[in-house]
């Protein structure tokens, strides 16, 4: 948990930093948040660990679904207040809806239209 | 400024939504915010208009530098609380440091190392 590189990140007032996860193809699959511990663990383990704002705890992506994200690189931006991960998405499904990417709603004629298929029923993913 | 598609976005308490801008190659070049007016203008004009938190006003990206972003698609995620733009970056420079992308600091051996060159001196870009 020590490390100057962690101190260099401009953590928000809530202690979080926004994180973009993209595959090596360039496909952006997810957007979430990390706190300092989550980013340290992500670097240490080589698997994405986020901070879930809704559950108010660390969230090892894939802990329930098995859809972990293997981290290939960690970048930050000019202001060091955003993190960009390059990941390999195990199972090919990042979204809790069972889609490849969370960014499946595209604007067409002033409506949001789903442009990616559901690859697996969420009930089958989460066993609920 | 009207439109149900704008109402569907889950605007933050500050009236903003985070926005990721990526090129058609998949390269993520920027992260910023939009308010409702900015997103409406972005869709209407086909050029990215953000809301600058530091200047507290609409920010037509490229208004000073000429490095506008031509919008190819607008997506939102499963929760409709993040926007993903596919853009063509005019001038090939998105970052105010004169680099292609803002995400030029990569973690190596617990230090952030710049992995993208400065393509143009910011003084030459902004004439300051």
Image: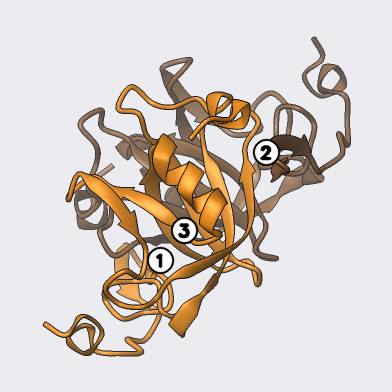
Chain colours: A orange, B brown
Q: Which mark is residue A128?
A: none
Q: Which residue is depicted at the point 57% across and 54% down?
A: A85
Q: Which mark is residue B110?
A: 2
Residue at image mark 1:
A103
How far separated are the C-alphas under marks 3 and 2? 17 Å
Question: Residue B71: percent from the left, percent from the top?
Answer: 57, 54
Vertical relation: A68 (above or below) A78: below
Element under disc 2 = loop
Q: Chain of mark 2?
A: B
Q: Chain of mark 3?
A: A
How far separated are the C-alphas under marks 2 and 1? 31 Å
Q: Nearer the viewer, residue B18 or B51?
A: B18
Question: In the visual, does A126 lie left or right of A63?
Answer: left
Q: Chain of mark 1?
A: A
Question: In the visual, does B2 lie left or right of A10?
Answer: left
Element under disc 1 = loop
Q: Is residue B82 visible?
A: no
Question: In the visual, does B63 lie left or right of B5?
Answer: right
**Is label 2 or label 1 in front?**
2
Residue at image mark 3:
A48
Q: Which residue is depicted at the point 34% across and 36% down?
A: B37
The residue at the far left in this view is A128
Q: Which residue is depicted at the point 41% across and 54% down?
A: A49
Question: Residue B127: percent from the left, percent from the top?
Answer: 82, 14
Question: Residue B3: percent from the left, percent from the top?
Answer: 23, 52
């Amino acid at each position: 948990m020590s490390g100057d590189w962690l101190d260099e990140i401009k953590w928000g007032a809530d202690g979080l930093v926004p994180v973009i996860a993209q595959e090596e193809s360039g496909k952006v699959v997810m957007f979430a948040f990390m706190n300092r511990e989550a980013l340290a663990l992500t670097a240490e383990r080589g698997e994405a660990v986020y901070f879930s704002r809704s559950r108010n705890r660390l969230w090892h992506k894939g802990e329930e679904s098995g859809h972990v994200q293997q981290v290939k690189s960690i970048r930050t931006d000019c202001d060091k207040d955003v993190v960009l991960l390059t990941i390999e998405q195990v199972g090919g499904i990042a979204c809790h809806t069972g889609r490849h990417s969370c960014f499946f709603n595209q604007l067409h004629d002033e409506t949001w239209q789903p442009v990616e298929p559901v690859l697996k029923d969420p009930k089958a993913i989460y066993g609920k």
